[in-house]
Image: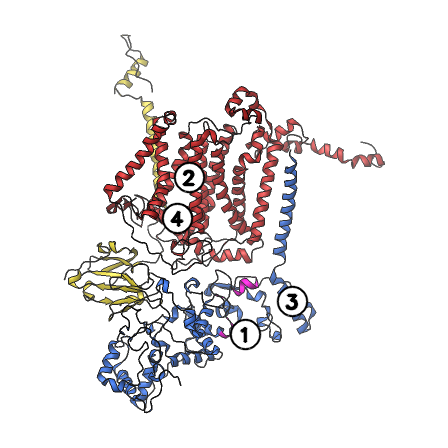
Amino acid sequence: MADPTSTAAARQLLDLEELSRKVKTSQIWKSIFRHGYEDTPRNRSLMVLSNVFLHLHPVKTRPAGLRITYTWGLGGISFYLFLLLTMTGLLLMFYYRPTVEHAYWDMKDLRYVVPFGDPLRNMHRWAAHLMVFVVMFHMASVFYRGGYKKPREYNWVIGVILLLLTFLLSFTGYLLPWDQLAIWAVTVGTNMAAASPILGAEGPLSIVGPGNDARFLLLGGKTVGQSALLRFYVMHCVLLPLAFSIIVVIHFWRVRKDEFSAVPLPPKAEREKGVSVEEWLRVNPKQRDKKVFVWPNLVAREFVATLLVTVGLLAWSLIAHAPLEEMANPNKTPNPSKAPWYFAGLQELLVYFDPWIAGVVLPTIILIGLMAIPYLDVNPKGVGYYSVKSRKFAVTMFTFGFGFWCTLIAIGYYLRGPGWEWYWPWQPWDIHRVTPQGALHNLPNWVGIPLLLAFFGAFVELPRRLWKRFAEELGPIRYLTTMLLAASMFLVPLKIILRLVFKVKYIASFPGINLNI
Amino acid sequence: MPRILYRLFFLGSVGLTLLFFVMVWQEGAPEWQGYQAQYYRLLAKTTGKPELARTPLEVKQVHLPEFDRTDRCTTCHVGVDQPKMVNAPQPFRTHPDYTVHPVEEYGCTICHGGQGMALTKADAHGLVKHWERPLLPKELIVASCAYCHQNLQGLKGAERLVQAKQLFDKAGCIGCHALNGWGGPISTELSDVAGKPLDEFDFRYVEGPHAAYAWLYEHFKNPQRVTPGDAKNNVPPTAMPNYRLTDAEAMLLTAFVLGAEHPQVPAKLRVAGPLPAPAPTYATPVEQGRAVFQKYGCTACHGYEGRGGVKNPNAMTGGEVPPLIYVAQGFTKDQLKTLIRDGRYPTRADPHGPTPPLWMPTWKDKIAPEELDALVEYLVSLYPADAASAGERK
Amino acid sequence: MSDPLPAPARPAPSIQQQEVDQEKLWNLWFTRKEFFNLAAWGAFFVGLGGSALSALRFFIPRVTYEPSATFRIGKPADFVAGEVNEKFKRSRRIWVVRDLPSDGGGIYVLWSRCTHLGCTPNWMPLDNKFKCPCHGSGFKRTGRNFEGPAPRPLERVKVALAEDGEIVVDMNVHFRDPKDWKKPEAYLTVHG
């Protein structure tokens, strides 16, 4: 070391570069940061490989998957929203007490007295709604690009489970503000549990009473009261987020293990010649190996997406207040009483079907049907890119189902008013308006049952004859399952038409066991 | 990496920062701080103590678990119990007689209504969606006295409620409407009205704000306008006559109905009144009969002193409730007594028309026998020496 | 799981062979090791299953803090045939109606809540109907709506006879559809 009094030596001490070098080669530093940050391919790899959070990603990925139009970032946004909800929810937990005496007033306090409580609560609510919306469209996006086909079937099933968990998280959270919207939406929702077959006190073939049926288990009582609030709180804050986290980890793991599905598309010239994607890839196998670094390409896009979602949510939270109606009053049912919007479709179906069908059977069939899709779809085309031409049947079926689901939600949410009467958006609500039912009649069973059998039979027999190859490719079990599920899906709008046009209430009815279709 | 990414990053980051500033600004400069600061400046000037102007600003609240509420009105209305502010403009003025019901014990909303927990003027005054009890207009605050004070006679400040009760008795409202379970069966129970959820009121024809007091006031002024019925939905028009009340009278009656509600008031806060006065004595049976006529609200349907004039659409009795001044001519005393005891339904003028909304209720379980005797004496005495026209009051 | 060893050819069994023969003594299709293994896993899953069932049962409390919806209203003899009894109208918001013997002679309980907007109707014995003072809805004594804006009949609530002969009303169970009114829970048949 030179003489510290000389200016050269002083400059040496203050030499930031030297200081920096000394720090960065120290033991402490090297124990924490195990690689440099200069932009080299090695460091790009290590950024992902040696970071516990980032190593969720692969080191390299195909550029086709980077395009926003491939995934619209929906999966990543869903997860980000989950994290945002966890964080905002955690903060809200410091002021919210899940008791009947305090819950509503704590919500008011969050709005008026807690610093930043109002935008925080708003963000939590709007992010929750956004997450339900985004996961549904994430599912659609994965469907339309075939990201569920072999070998990714199980991950699709995991995804459906996550969809269900998202609905449940939103539903349990819906009760917590303890206002009129909350208590009656949950009443409508849990009444569907009471309508379950066998395990519901008011369902067909019931073996339990109102004191120990599925609804009692959910609510811890016969009414939506203090027990329900506490249970929903624990489920919403602990049980369901834990379950969601565990399963989402499996979901990510599977995406990595099965490799992200995006494939490079053939150039326009080849596509115009009519060359299919799979053919082109078979001829040019090296195209599959063309990859780019995830750091920074993918991570930067994820970061920007996260940023934009946050900006949008924050802006919306500052403009629009999340709803808080009058305090929950078990003696006063608002008219209309609506379930949360993502269940409004099922509530709309209550007009045409008994509660056990609209609230239990149909959702179950929908979930089972969704989970079965990867195992029923043997068409190898359309994996990793969007295509309608090469998957006409699959796309048609899904689009119809998804479109119908969204339509039902729109009707239930926007076009139904007091008494669940039909109201166009420009019509004012009139609590006195009651449309008389008109003469609804039931089809006698000797007509209805054969009709149902004929309907299902037609769905099974006719396609087999008209599109022989389609049936043969699927094989008997898959074909039967697919057509029965498709028949069930089309039975719903058909029954609606039967009721609206022909005034038929039940196709077949067995009032003794409370079973009516 | 594509340029759009950098642009979006820039926009996003700038946007986020801007929004944070907006959020901090919203939180950092709330409405109430302006009012409070203004108050302290005014207080400093009024008291001549300039250091008061620098009093730190904070949210002030009164937490009242026994009333199940927390009132933060004093955050802006800081001067309610500051005697030096009697001449200050609102919201800083001293509350009159603030020592009678101190703010720390009673809060504000129990008498005034409003959303006590809120901290903006609009929300706190409560004329917002999903808040059922907005701030009461000045003339109606007196209604709240009735929540705790069971006897209002001689209660300073509650004179108007006493006046209201007198008007209520004179008009005979009890003949059609029940009050606390006692009264006529023709129309609604009045103690349930003020506490009804707002979506059970029909505000279509109400010009004022969507609040219970506005509906009540306008209904008193013109029942036909506010409750005209709805033929399409089988709701008949109101049978309540238009009493041509003045604005002041309508306010009194509105206060009376608002005060008839039974909020949950802790027992220790209830103020019982003195024992009721002994039953009055009457010089003649006719005088007693007049008191009975008043007591059971016969005036409501049969008109003041039985002169009739109250409409009863599609009733065979000329579309009106029959006047009583001629009963001495048409009935014996025993017939009258039977009629009053058993009640009667009017026959329809047009058999296919609507049911007449008013009828003679069954009084046998309500009127005591000696009251009935006196009442009949009074009715018989109504036969006029001169033929006064029906329907004229006073 | 290994098959039992084939029978040895040696005439004189060694010690190991004796052990194997011991195991084969019972002529069973699993070894002792396998048996204990199986028993252990079996016990584990039984324990796990039991825990799961216990957890499920945990969520069903034996008693709740909800206000009681059942109460007694006296004996059938307290109610006169052909009459609408208003004794419990204010306290419990119900009418107790007893049919004349010619109409069935039974007792049913009506909820005193108008099906239009929830007001409390009045019973008019002279007109033999329930009349709601709010918007004029009219109901026959059976509860059927026949005039005014009410969309459906008055609801009946569950009635039952306790062992000591008293009538027990359960406000938790409502019968809205006239088709259900003949059910024994909605209509208490009384003899004598």
Label 2 in the same subunit as label 3: no
Quarter-of-image position of residue C18: top left
Identify the residue under disc 4: A348
The amino acid type of the residue labelled 1 equals: Tyr
Distance from the alpha carbon under mark 1 to that under mark 3: 22 Å
Chain to which mark 3 belongs: B
Q: Disc number at residue B38?
A: 3
Q: Earlier in the sequence, mark 1 or mark 3?
A: 3
Distance from the alpha carbon under mark 2 to that under mark 1: 67 Å
The amino acid type of the residue labelled 3 equals: Gln
Residues at marks 1 and 3 touching, judged by CB atoms closer than 8 Å: no
Q: Disc number at residue A180?
A: none
Identify the residue under disc 2: A401
Disc 3: CA contacts within 10 A as few (<14), some (14-19) or many (>=20): some
Q: Give the residues drawn in magenta, as a range.
A: B116-139
Disc 4: CA contacts within 10 A as few (<14), some (14-19) or many (>=20): many
Identify the residue under disc 1: B98
On the picture, is B157 further left or further right than A493?
right
The amino acid type of the residue labelled 4 equals: Glu
- As helix, strand or loop, the secondary structure at mark 3 comes to helix
- On the image, the x and y values in percent for residue B298 come to 33, 80
For the stretch drawn in magenta, what is the main secondary structure?
Answer: loop
Label 4 in the same subunit as label 3: no
Label 1 in the same subunit as label 3: yes
Q: Earlier in the sequence, mark 2 or mark 4?
A: 4
Q: Is residue B244 above or below residue A405?
A: below
On the picture, is B134 further left or further right than A482?
right
The label nearer to you, 1 versus 3, is 3
